[in-house]
Image: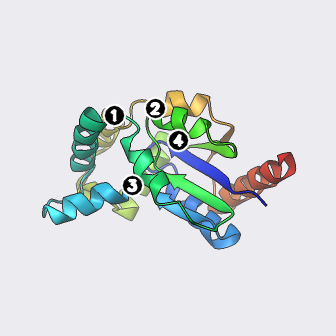
Amino acid sequence: MEQIIIGIVGEIASGKGTATNYLKRKYRAKIVKTSAPIKIILKTLDQPITRENLTNSIAALRSVFGDDVIVKAALSKLSGTRSKLIVLDGLRKYDEIKLLRKLKNFKLIYISADKKIRYERLIKRQEKHDDKTKTYFQFLRDQKMMNDKDVPKIGKRADFKINNSGATKELYLQIDKIIKQINEKK
C-alpha cells in the first residue's frame, strides 16, 4: 500500500485538530503540525504563543525563505516514515498546496464551520495564550490576518469538503467516508 498524504485546511477553530486526532487514533496516521517549528522558536525566544506572534513569525520566515518554507520543513520530517497515512495539519498558503499537489498521493480536505460555533470552540479550548480573553470582533479580525486570509479560497479547490457545524460524531462519519473514497481510488 502506498503512502497517502492528506492536507487539512480550515478556518480558525473549524475542527482541524479534532479531525487530525481522529485520523491518528482510528487510522494510525502520522500527524505533522505545520506550526510546530514556529512554536519551538517562540518558546526558545521566551515569547507567548499567541496567534499574532505565530502569524508574525511565519510571515518573517516566508518573506526570507518563500511561502512554502513551512511545508518544506514539514515534508523533511517525513523522510523514512513508514506510516501509510500522513496528515499535514495547518496549511495556509497557495504555494504550500502547489508544492503538495506535485506529490502522487496528496489529497486536500477543507473543514468549515459556522463562525459563531468556531468562536465558541476557540474560547472553550484556549489553545493559544490569548484565546480566553478574545472578543468575537477580535476573532473575526484574526481571520483576516495575513496567515489565514487565503484559507477560504484554498478550500474551494479542496478534493474534499467537510462542514463541521454539527456534532463530533458527524465529523467522524464524514472523515470515514472520505478515507473510504481515497482508498477506493488507489
**Which residue in the structure is indicated by mark 4?**
114
- Of label 3 and label 1, which has the lower sequence position? 1
- The number of numbered badges drawn on the structure is 4
**Is label 2 in a helix, a strand or a loop?**
helix
In front: mark 3 or mark 1?
1
Mark 2 = which residue?
A: 95
Please report contact status of discs 1 and 2: CB closer than 8 Å, yes or no: yes
**Residue 95 x/y as whole percent:** 46, 32
Tell me the number on the disc at residue 6: none
Name the residue carrying label 3: 122
Q: Which of pointers 1 and 2 lies earlier in the amino acid sequence?
A: 1
- Mark 1 sits on what residue? 66
Q: Are marks 3 and 1 in contact (CB under 8 Å)?
A: no
22 w.r.t. 119: above or below: below
Q: Residue at x 53, y 53 (%)?
A: 88
Label 4: which secondary element:
loop
Q: Residue 73: percent from the left, percent from the top?
A: 40, 51
Q: Amino acid at mark 4?
A: Asp
Task: Identify residue type, mark 1.
Answer: Gly
Q: Marks 4 and 1, how far apart in space?
A: 32 Å
Q: Is residue 77 visible?
A: yes
Q: Amino acid at mark 3?
A: Leu
* Residue at 61 percent of width and 68 percent of height: 24
Q: Marks 4/2: CA distance?
A: 27 Å
Callout 1: 10 Å neighbours few (<14), some, many (20+)? few
SS class, disc 1 = loop
Q: Residue at x 46, y 60 (%)?
A: 77
